[in-house]
Image (cartoon, helix red, strand yellow):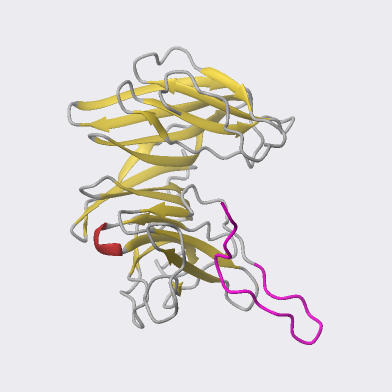
Amino acid sequence: MSDVLVGPGTLSVDHRPPPGRTLGDGRHPVAAGQDGYAVIYVEPEGATPRIAIRDFDAVGIPCNAATSCGVDTTVGEDATPVVDAHPVVAALPDGEYITAFVEFGGDGDGLGVAMQLVVPGEATQPAVSFMNQATLGAQYDPDLVWTGEEVVGAYVDSSNLDTAPDIRWRRFNNGAGATEEVLAGTTAAEFNVALTATTDGFAAAWRESSGFEETVRVRRYGEFGTVEWSVAQPFSHPTALIVLPLLNSTNGTYCWCTRTRGLTPRVRATSDVSATRSSTLMCPARSKAGTLPPKLPGTKGM
């Protein structure tokens, strides 16, 4: 195993440090497909932050400049990304990628969630469109996933002044977007939405906070309808993120990682067949080279 620079190294100019790069807080800054994978990142310095995506081949090696693989492609050239763009990416068939990020002004009112199809190596990319249909207030913190049949996107929405922040989601099939729907719209604060593909659809998880009580809610959309459950957890640090990988497709086992107020990372696992309980594991402070994380309950071969 070896490290690979996502973007080309940049030298300092006039004794000034070179521009930095960050993955942001998007749930899926890396996406893998049949032909390879891509990493999306932000270069926050400059008058307008730059979002870029770089793709790698199926064995993780950037190709030479004579091919489309390994090329650093700018995302959102016809948009105005913000520093906290938190970009995400999903791999599509035929080596293409769909991206989403936060930008300013393009939807007509403040922050909005822009989407763009990216064809690595092409000089001209498709135009930016918008995931959000509601434009009042701010829409931000997106995630998206390719289910094998459609793209599903979700984001935090503040258009309803009585219940914001809420979470809305939208499905896209063959480039056409269905009307957005409210995924979570109670008077509690709903945020940090994360998506994952399942064997027959997709699942969404988000944090719900009311007073000093916090709950992680999970909803699975499948062939036979929806299944929803929730797990109460200690009040997390405001910057704690949820990630939602599907660990076991047989019983729908998922996990997420959060940080409590004491900044202790914790991994929790739960399943849609045992929704009343979850297991908690403390993340090691520092992992040793060559070691694997502890086995999570309900998983096989992990």
Q: Is residue 6 visible?
A: yes
> Which residue is at the front of the view, 295 or 206?
295
Q: In this view, does 29 lie above or below 96?
A: above
Image quadrant assignment for residue 49: bottom right
Report x, y in % for residue 35: 32, 59
The magenta stretch spans residue 14: yes
Q: In this view, does 21 lie to the left or right of 52?
A: right
269 horizontally vs 246: left or right? right
Residue 75 lies, in percent from the top left, at 44, 71
Q: In this view, does 108 lie to the left or right of 173?
A: right
Residue 44 lies in the magenta-colored region: no
Report the magenta residues as a range.
1-20
Left or right: 229 with respect to 104?
Answer: left
Residue extending farthest to the bottom is 14
Q: Position of residue 28 (x, y in %)?
A: 46, 50
- Quarter of the image for residue 147 reads top left
**Whole-percent x, y for residue 212 in the image:** 64, 25
In the foreground, 64 or 235: 64
Snapshot quadrant of residue 230: top left
Q: Where is 68 relative to 166, above or below? A: below
- Considering the whole magenta stretch, tell me its main secondary structure: loop
Question: What residue sits 21% from the left and 27% below the top?
Answer: 225
Depicted 288 relative to depicted 125: above or below: above
The answer to whether residue 180 is seen in the rendering is no
Q: Residue at left 23%, top 47%?
A: 148
Image point 60% across, 22% down: which residue? 281
How many numbered marks appear?
0
* Residue situated furthest right in the rendering: 15
Tell me what residue is drawn at x 34 percent, y 45 percent: 169
